[in-house]
Image (cartoon, rainbow, N blue to C red):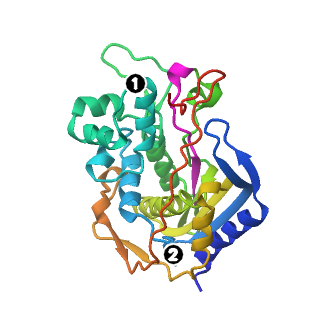
Amino acid sequence: MNLGEQQYLDLLKDILKNGVKKIDRGTGDVSYSVFGRQLRFDLSQEFPLLTTKKVYWKGVLHELYWFLSGQSNIKYLVDNNVHIWDDYPYRRYKITNHKSQMTKEEFIERIKTSGKFAEKWGNLPRIYGELWRRWPTSAKATVGKPTRTIDQLSWAINEVIQDPACHNAIITSWNPEYLYTMAEYKDTSHFPICHNMYQLNVNDGKLSLQLYQRSADIFLGVPFNIASYALLALIIAKVAGYQTGDFIHTFGDVHIYKIHLEQVKEQLKRKPLPFPKVSFNHDFKTIDSFKPEYVVLENYQSYPAIRAPLSVTGGYFGKNKNIFEIK
């Protein structure tokens, strides 16, 4: 029995039974929510890529590389035919250009074919990759010297290498200056940071990673998040020279959207298959020398994918202006 995946299925059942109805104030989308849950996976024994529905592995690989390389423009993803981040830049474009009749498909084609258009409209400032690798500081730029940024990820990896007993190897994406009503509209990142903090820890020569996700779309987003952060843990363990330990996924508000209820019920009819394995076909010594093509997924068997619409909720919400209100 695949006990790792059964944890996830049990959490789906928990939310169906105990979830409290909530309505997003920006979009009106309905969800059913519980608070404070946790999943744990032993990465030395298994790789938690869910089997009760097919998980988009190519998307996992390219999105994680996008984060690791510090990028924030979706053009890299679009060029690699990964479209999981298309909605937010398109919504930003439509809000600014509310008379435009451009469809999302036309918008993405312009991102792909026009460098200038992609530079202007494909960027999502102050999201994961930028904040992991180029956290903006208050230091002002001087002549001949750019504004100082902090590479949190490299720092945390060096911490666990130099001091395996450290308790401080934390990477955060939660910057209040740019989020929600804490932000001024001109500075807002527009995108709601969801998986907002993770910590590295070494015990008995094994590196573990714990993610805190303050808001979690359990059906559509979480399977992707599990695979992504489990792979991140494997990559960091290799770079730091440790064996692999656990991936611990800790949730704040974890929910099922009303528009996903039938899909969840379909998934719960399926019996989990054995988890696959992940290995690397290339030796890399630093986080910057990692490439998606170095990852080998072995023996992944799954049920078919279950399609569902994305609920584009969260982000900036002011008294008189909602980033997701398209006129």
- Image x and y of residue 301, in percent: 42, 80
Q: Residue at x 27, y 66 (%)?
A: 282
Q: Quadrant of the N terminus?
A: bottom right
From the image, state whether disc 1 or disc 2 is nearer to you: 1
Q: Nearer the viewer, residue 277 or 258?
A: 258
Q: Residue at x 51, y 59 (%)?
A: 308
Badge 1 element: loop
Q: How many numbered dots are placed on residues in this image? A: 2
Q: Which of 114 and 229 is in front in this view?
A: 114
Asked whether 30 falls inside the magenta stretch, the response is: no
- Image x and y of residue 139, in percent: 48, 20
Badge 2 element: loop
Q: Residues within 10 Å of mark 1 (few under 14, many from 20)?
A: few
Marking on residue 44: 2
- Position of residue 50 relative to residue 125, above or below, is below
- Image x and y of residue 250, in percent: 65, 57
What type is the residue that disc 2 sits on?
Ser
Q: Do the residues labelled 1 and 2 touch (CB within 8 Å)?
A: no
Marking on residue 8: none
Residue extending farthest to the left is: 113
What type is the residue that disc 1 sits on?
Lys
Name the residue tied to disc 1: 99
Asked whether 189 falls inside the magenta stretch, the response is: yes
Magenta-drawn segment: 185-201
Q: Residue at x 23, y 33 (%)?
A: 115
Q: Which sits earlier in the primary sequence, circle 1 or circle 2?
A: 2
Q: Is residue 138 in sight in this rendering? A: no
52 left or right of 84?
right
Q: Is residue 114 in sight in this rendering? A: yes
In three-dimensional space, the C-alpha distance between marks 1 and 2, rounded to whole angstroms, equals 53 Å
